[in-house]
Image (cartoon, rainbow, N blue to C red):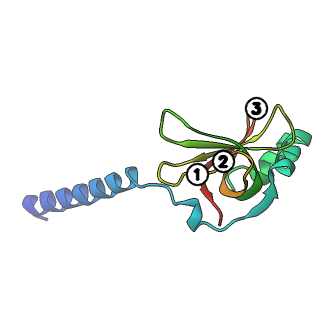
Amino acid sequence: MRPKTMIAVAATVALVGGVYAWLEYNRKPASTSDLSTEISISAADLLKAFADDELTANVRFNDRVIEVSGTVISSDVGEDGRTEVLLDTGDPLANVSCSFEPGTEPQWRAGTEVRVKGICTGMLMDVVLVRCTPVQ
């Protein structure tokens, strides 16, 4: 091949690769409302599963789209703009924490029975769900 042709091919490959890399870097994760629910469970049963055997619960729930039903304890907006809703589990020391992306946050009051779909990331003090969306 001629040098000019090789340079043109290399520049084209670099341009296409750069555009692809930029698009992948800036891609947003899929909304959980578009993903199918793998497991439906109550907030109390979810906490009980983690409290009884955390290793087994991690295998069963982590990185899966789950639907959790429960009663709202509180709803607060954090500094990052995400709304965090705590669901009652019957245990005063541990709850289910649901983090909603800005623009998807519900307007729930304490005492409201709700269903939430999100991705479980495990248990710290509370069982944590991220990228949550309300279920109608």
Q: Residue 99 shows which numbered tag? A: none
Asked if the residue under mark 1 is in contact with the one under mark 2, i.e. CB atoms within 8 Å, the reply is yes
Between residue 66 and residue 55, name the one nearer to us: 66
Q: Secondary structure at mark 1?
A: loop
Q: How far is disc 3 from disc 2 in space, using C-alphas?
A: 23 Å
Q: Position of residue 110 (x, y in %)?
A: 70, 45
Q: How far is disc 3 from disc 1 in space, using C-alphas?
A: 25 Å
Q: Which residue is mark 3?
A: 125
Q: Position of residue 51 (x, y in %)?
A: 88, 39
Q: Position of residue 21 (x, y in %)?
A: 34, 53
Q: Which residue is mark 2?
A: 109
Q: Which residue is mark 1?
A: 107
Amino acid type of disc 2? Arg
Between residue 105 and residue 30, name the one nearer to us: 105
Looking at the rendering, which quadrant does residue 136 occupy?
A: bottom right
Amino acid type of disc 1? Gln
View extreme (right): residue: 52
> Residue at image x 65%, y 63%?
135
Q: How far is disc 2 from disc 1 in space, using C-alphas?
A: 7 Å
